Image (spheres, grey):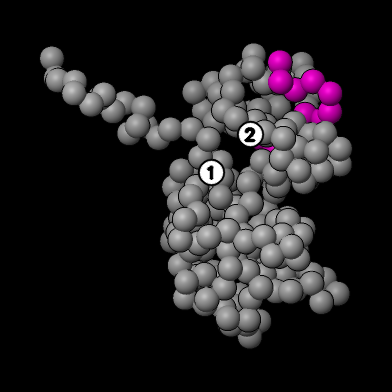
Amino acid sequence: MRFLLMHTSGGEGSVALADTEAADAVVASETLPGRSSSERLVPAVRRLMEASGWRLRDLTAVVVVDGPGSFTGVRVGLSAAKGLCEAGGVPLIAVSRLALLAACVGEGAVHAVLDAGRGEFYYGEYVGRRLVREALLGEDEVRAAAGEGVLGVCEAKVAEALAGMRPRLVAEPVAGDALAFAVERAGMGDFDDAALADANYLRRSDAEIFAKPKGSSAK
């Protein structure tokens, strides 16, 4: 199986090509420095595909990390993935960034936590690759929710905020880390509908937060 994998939801973006029949499954990858995904994502995909001699129609699926994280990064990645799926006539597989973090932390029960700003956290409870729940929580709620199992983080800011809970700090997941999820889901024929797939924000946008209720008038 061949996959194009993209992750633009975190602080740094990445793209990878993976072939399950190759000795090293991740056959090519490229990092997108800083918040440059909007300009560099599609050119990076083109470079990797051309250098490897791959065509979109040869892919088993396009895999995208659909958040939570940077609003712009999530939108850029998901929009590009959906466009590539349509252009190549290939399926889409969307993977949660929290699921990737949990998988990078270890096996068993993992409480994955990411910074959501405004004193809040993106929280995901996973057992292996099985989702228990994801939610937007405050610090006290995270402390209450994360009982048995390992607390996993990939951001120093979160590790510091939750230091009393002895979090396990790991490197930020990259696109290639989504391969295990892609293989499992493709093997089951479990694909997302590219036309209906939406971003995994876990929170409202500023426009929604500050929007005036319908029927209200300016004072």
Outermost residue toward the bottom?
53
9 to the left or right of 214 = right
Outermost residue toward the front?
189
**Is tag 1's residue or tag 2's residue first in the polypeptide sequence?**
2
Point out residue 116 in the picture as x, y percentages from the top left corner. 54, 31
Q: Which residue is mark 1?
A: 200
User: In the rendered structure, are the residues bearing label 1 and label 2 in contact, judged by CB atoms less than 8 Å apart?
Assistant: yes
User: Badge 2: few (under 14), some or many (20 or more) residues near its Cα, within 10 Å?
Assistant: many
Q: Residue at x 66, y 41 (%)?
A: 98
Q: Quadrant of residue 169?
A: top right
Q: What segment carries the magenta color?
A: 144-155
Q: Quadrant of residue 136?
A: top right
**In the structure shown, which secondary structural element does the residue marked by tag 2 occupy?**
strand
Q: Residue at x 36, y 27 (%)?
A: 209
Residue type at numbered disc 2? Glu
Q: Residue at x 35, y 32 (%)?
A: 208
Q: Which residue is mark 2?
A: 134
The residue closer to the viewer here, 50 or 125, is 125
Looking at the image, can residue 30 be seen?
no
Q: Quadrant of residue 14?
A: bottom right
Instruction: Give the CA distance from mark 1 to mark 2.
Output: 10 Å
Figure check: 95 above or below 189: above
Point out residue 158 in the picture as x, y percentages from the top left corner. 66, 28
Q: Is residue 20 magenta?
A: no
Point out residue 112 in the picture as x, y percentages from the top left corner. 71, 34
The residue closer to the viewer here, 201 or 44, is 201
Residue type at numbered disc 1? Asn
Figure check: 113 above or below 65: above
Figure check: 117 above or below 196: above
2 to the left or right of 50 = right
Name the quadrant of the N terminus: bottom right
